[in-house]
Amino acid sequence: MPIIPLSGSAVAHGALIPLGTYTYTSPAGGVGFNLPANSSIYQDLIIVCSLRNEVAGAGLTFYFNGDVGSGNYSSAYINTNAATVSAGRSASQNYIVWYQEPTPYDAPNMFATHTFHLINPHASTTTPYRTVLHKWGNDLNGNGSTGIQVISWIGAATMAAVTVGSTSGNFSTGSTFSIYGVRSVGQ
Amino acid sequence: MSMYPIATYTNTTPASTVTFNNIPQNFTHLQVRMITRINAPGNNNWYADLGRFNGDATASNYFAHSAVQMYSTVGGGAATLASSYDTTNGLVLNNSLMEAGVSLNYMTATIFDVLDYTNTNKFKTYRSFYGFVTVPTPCQVGLFSGVWKNTSAVTSLTIYNPINNWTSNTRFDLYGISTSNTTGA
């Protein structure tokens, strides 16, 4: 297939389209973004979060289409925590979970940042498997962490929803969740 | 900051090279968002997708650094967390999955940035964030960065795999990123 460059009026449109955002004015649970039926007009999706949790030890969860019980997620990561660099992987998880979020043990204005890049999420109903690139950062009273992760989801369904949730408790006031679509040529 | 699509390529017929020519010079940065898989029966693990600016194949012009976590073998294997520095034959964009023992539906996702690509007073620096994960292994996540030791403006970008063709689900999208003259944002 030839390379398709932009031409004519198509040059004018931007690629990064804000699709939805939530800003918490009081503590609440996670956010589920229901993707519009024409979501295939976006080549990629980007989710950006600024998070703090109300419960010590709580973690962030991430999943598609409400799929939390089929072992369809696998991941690998690199994380730095103060002077330590660690790496690992998990296979056939029921959902993605990541700990080390700011909680009531940490200073009140500490929030973590998370960015999820969903590459080619609408390719078809079953193939290829969806791949996500995730990066994060936070400071926990001088400790904190930064890292990267790759996630795969082998669910055989059209992607219709993405959820960023919590293992327990609510996210704090001031937490934000935003989703963007990335349009390619012809979209 | 605004982002604009420039060109796209989907690998619907077997190929191992794609070249974006005549890259517009009116953006500040470039970004390539790509999803790749190598179809190399009999081969295991992975192999890097490489790149060249302006068709320059001079090995001494490219240097790359990496921080990579990997599990190498199907069904297990120890984790390796490694960093490297090398003179290369081109831009090192990722390590792209080609493991013959796992489904071709598993892909490698890569986001590749080139900053200030039209500046004729700088060598061009790039950064790449990539990963793939299969069940249970191999899997890999990492960062590459590097430099093209040439001050020419980047007018073309070639991405290639030296091992074999990519699968039909492979796709490359090139974007330009602009900034505001007023705020610099």
Image: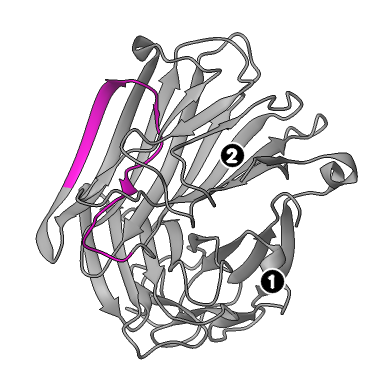
Q: Label 1: chain?
A: A
- Residue B31's label in the rendered image is 2
Image quarter for residue B9?
top right
Q: Is residue A80 left or right of residue B1?
A: left
Where is residue A33 drawn, in percent x and y? 62, 79
| In the depicted structure, whether residue A57 falls above or below residue B80 | below
Marks 1 and 2 share the same chain: no
Figure quadrant of the C terminus of chain B: top right
Where is residue A137 drawn, in percent x and y? 42, 55
The residue sitting at 41% across, 37% down in the picture is: B93
Q: Label 2: chain?
A: B
Q: Residues within 10 Å of mark 1 (few under 14, many from 20)?
A: some
Image quarter for residue A34?
bottom right
Q: Residues within 10 Å of mark 2 (few under 14, many from 20)?
A: many
Closer-to-camera residue (B6/B19): B19
The residue sitting at 74% across, 34% down in the picture is: B179
Q: Is residue B38 left or right of residue A170?
A: left
Judge whether residue A144 can be spotted in this image.
Answer: no
In magenta, the rendered stretch is B81-103
Residue identified by numbered label 1: A39
Cα–Cα span, label 1 and label 2: 22 Å
In magenta segment, residue B185? no
Where is residue A4 drawn, in percent x and y? 70, 42
| In the depicted structure, whether residue B28 falls above or below residue A62 | above
In magenta segment, residue B98? yes
